[in-house]
Amino acid sequence: MTTDTEPIRLPAVSDEELVSRIRTGDLRLFEELMRRYNQRLYRVARAIVKDEDEAEDVMQQAYIQAYLHLDQFAGRSQLATWLTRIAIREALGRRRKRREDQWPAGRDEDRMLPVNAPDSPDPERLAYAAEIRTLLESSIDALPDTYRLVFVCREVEGLSTSETADALELGEEAVKTRLHRARGMLRRELFARAGSASMEAFTFYRPRCDRVVRRVLDHIARMAH
């Protein structure tokens, strides 16, 4: 039986082939591209904006921008890295605008946004295996921006040091230093209890995946007319 938490299985098609065929007009493969990288883009966007719905909006806009500028992808970096950079810039732009609207003065980096609790039970949240995962997500959200994004890329999404450095446009030593400090900021007992649960934090469940894909494809279809 298929469940909302099961991973989406994709055919073994290389990123290069996907891009090449999308450029020739095979739009259905853009859906495959999105499903391949939805989890990563969601986690990166969520780490910056700290809001699930806004993270979806970031993803949608990032994919639209990627589609519009696909001819600019020269293959000098991995497609995943290119998409991640687009999502990061979109998320940072939204966060900067939000802070300007809410806090025109003062040190924004010292103000932490609260984690909004839903008014009614969320089916996606009910899918979490244990309370520790929610506690871990709250602890990650509390990390300073500089360290939170590196931590999510390395520990949650599982990128290598070099992949993280490439995506965030940092040096590898900076990535290592920020990751070390991020780990130290998390309570030792919580991190020890969480263990492998960190790989499940900010999971991008199937309904959200389908929703983002549908919105992006609808938008692209409207642009074509």
Image (cartoon, helix red, strand yellow):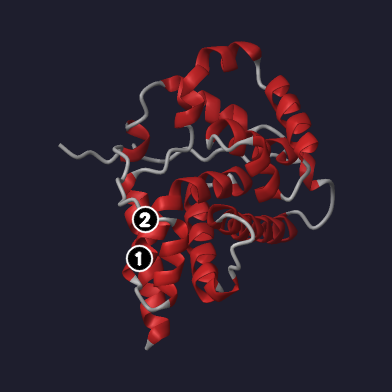
Q: Residue furthest left?
A: 1
Residue 180 falls in image quadrant? top right
Earlier-in-chain disc, 2 versus 1:
2
Depicted 101 relative to depicted 187: above or below: below
The answer to whether mark 2 and mark 1 are in CB contact below 8 A is: yes
- Look at 78% across and 30% down and name the residue there: 177
Residue 13: mark: 2
State the separation of the CA atoms marked 2 and 1. Answer: 10 Å
Taking the image as drawn, is residue 171 in sight? yes
For the C terminus, the quadrant is bottom left
Residue 150: mark: none
Taking the image as drawn, is residue 122 in sight? no
Residue 182 falls in image quadrant? top right
SS category of the residue bearing label 1: helix
Residue bearing mark 1: 29
For the N terminus, the quadrant is top left
Question: Which tag is nearer the camera, tag 2 or tag 1?
Answer: 2
- Look at 63% across and 54% down and name the residue there: 88
Residue type (three-letter) at the residue carrying disc 1: Leu
- Look at 84% across and 49% down and name the residue there: 106
Residue type (three-letter) at the residue carrying disc 2: Val
Depicted 187 relative to depicted 125: above or below: above
SS category of the residue bearing label 2: loop
Q: Indicate left or right for 130 with 92 as reference.
A: left
Depicted 217 relative to depicted 168: above or below: below
Residue 216 in the image, given as x and y percentages of width and height: 41, 67
Residue 7 in the image, given as x and y percentages of width and height: 32, 40
Local packing at callout 2 (Cα closer than 10 Å; few below 14, some 14-19, many 20+) is few
Q: Residue furthest right?
A: 106
